[in-house]
Image (cartoon, rainbow, N blue to C red):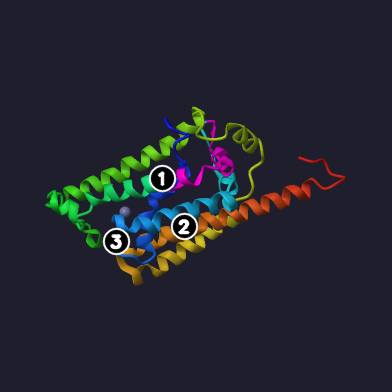
C-alpha cells in the first residue's frame, strides 16, 4: 500500500504462498523452503500471475461479494496492470523469500528453528488423532497463521474501502463494479469437485494432503476464473446483438 509502484502486488501475494505449492507437487519440504528452490519458484510464480492476468481475471473476481458497502469485485482490475518483468520477478522473490524465512523458525524440522532452540517441547494437546506436540516454533506458526490471515482479509477490505492510490486501476474498478454479477454455479462446482478429489487422495499422501489440496485450488482459481470470464463475455455479446438494447 505504501509503495504501490515498486511492487507487483499479485506476484507478491502468489509468491508468498508458493513454497507450500511446491511441497504439494512432490518436492521435499526442506527443499521447497530453502533458497535452492528460488530459481524454480520465482519464474513459476511470474508465469502463474501472467496466466491469471491473461485468462482468469477479471472473471475470478466477478463473483466476489460486497461487504459493508465495499465491492470486492474491484480486484478484477488487476487484469489491466502490466508491471515490468523485473518488478514481477523481484516481487515474487520477496513473497517466496518471506514465506521461507518465516517458516524457517516456525517449523521444528527446520535447521534454523533447531539452531535457535525454538523446537523445544512446551506441552502436548491430546485430541485423539489430532494430538499435537507444541513447541515455541509451533506456537509462533499457529498464531502467525491466524493473525496473518486476519490481516490479509482486513487488507483486502481496506485497500478497496480507502481506494489506496496506485494499488489498483480505480477507473477500471468503477467499470467492473457497475456490471452485473454472473452465476457462480460452474466455478463453485469445479472447486467442489477438486476439493473432493483432494480429500480422496489425502490418505495416500499423508502429511502432504492439505498441500495437494492447495495445488488443486490453484488450478481451480485459474480454470474457474477463465470459465466465468468466457461465459460472461459470451452472454454479454449475446445481449448486445442487433435488435436488443445493448448493455
Ligand atoms: Zn510453508
Dot 2 or dot 1, earlier in sequence: 1
Give the mark nearest the N terminus, 3 or 2: 3
| The label number, if any, that marks residue 217 in the structure image | 2
Question: Could you tell me which residue is drawn at 82 percent across and 48 percent down?
Answer: 241
Q: Quadrant of the N terminus?
A: top left
Secondary structure under tag 1 reads: helix
Q: Few, some or many C-alpha atoms within 10 Å of disc 2 (few <14, some 14-19, many ≥20)? A: some
Inspect the magenta stretch and tell me whether residue 213 lies in it.
no
The answer for how far apart the CA atoms under marks 3 and 2 are is 22 Å
Q: Do labels 3 and 2 touch, CB within 8 Å? A: no
Q: Quadrant for ligand 1? A: bottom left
The region drawn magenta spans: 69-90
Establish if 120 lies above or below 66.
Answer: below
Q: Residue reaching furthest front?
A: 86
Magenta stretch secondary structure, dominant: helix
- Residue 111 location in percent, x, y? 18, 56
Which of the two marks, 3 or 2, is nearer to us in this view?
3
Beta carbon at label 3 within 8 Å of ligand 1: no
Identify the residue position indicated by label 1 in the image. Answer: 90
Q: Is residue 240 above or below residue 168?
A: below
Q: Can see residue 133?
A: no
Identify the secondary structure beneath mark 3.
helix
**Left or right of 45 on screen, residue 146:** left
Disc 2 + disc 1, Cβ < 8 Å: no
Marks 1 and 3, Cα distance to the nearest angstrom? 20 Å
Number of the front mark, 1 or 3? 1
Q: Residue at x 84, y 44 (%)?
A: 244
Q: Which disc, if any, is residue 31?
A: 3
Label 1–label 3 contact, CB within 8 A: no
Ligand 1 closer than 8 Å to the CB at disc 2?
no
Q: Marks 2 and 1, how far apart in space?
A: 25 Å
Q: Tell me the mark number nearer the camera, choosing from 2 and 1.
A: 1
Amino acid at each position: 500500500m505504501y509503495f504501490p509502484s515498486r511492487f507487483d502486488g499479485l506476484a507478491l501475494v502468489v509468491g508468498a504462498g508458493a513454497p507450500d505449492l511446491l511441497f504439494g507437487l512432490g518436492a521435499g519440504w526442506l527443499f521447497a523452503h530453502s533458497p535452492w528452490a528460488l530459481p524454480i519458484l520465482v519464474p513459476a510464480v511470474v508465469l502463474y500471475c501472467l496466466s491469471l492476468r491473461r485468462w482468469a481475471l477479471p472473471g475470478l473476481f466477478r463473483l466476489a461479494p460486497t461487504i459493508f458497502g465495499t465491492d470486492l469485485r474491484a480486484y478484477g482490475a488487476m487484469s489491466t496492470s502490466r508491471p515490468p518483468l523485473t518488478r514481477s520477478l523481484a516481487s515474487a522473490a520477496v513473497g517466496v523469500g518471506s514465506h521461507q524465512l518465516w517458516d524457517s523458525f516456525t517449523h521444528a524440522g527446520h535447521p534454523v528453528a533447531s539452531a535457535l532452540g525454538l523446537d523445544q517441547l512446551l506441552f502436548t494437546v491430546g485430541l485423539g488423532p489430532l494430538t499435537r506436540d507444541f513447541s515455541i516454533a509451533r506456537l509462533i506458526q499457529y498464531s502467525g497463521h491466524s493473525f496473518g490471515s486476519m490481516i490479509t482479509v482486513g487488507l483486502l477490505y481496506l485497500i478497496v474501502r480507502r481506494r489506496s492510490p496506485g494499488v489498483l486501476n480505480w477507473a477500471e474498478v468503477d467499470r467492473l463494479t457497475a456490471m452485473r454479477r454472473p452465476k457462480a454455479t460452474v466455478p463453485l462446482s469445479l472447486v467442489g469437485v477438486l476439493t473432493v478429489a483432494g480429500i480422496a487422495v489425502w490418505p495416500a499422501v499423508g502429511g502432504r494432503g492439505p498441500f495437494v489440496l492447495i495445488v488443486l485450488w490453484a488450478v481451480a482459481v485459474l480454470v474457474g476464473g477463465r470459465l466465468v470470464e468466457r461465459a460472461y463475455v459470451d452472454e454479454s455479446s449475446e445481449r448486445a446483438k442487433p435488435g436488443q438494447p445493448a448493455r
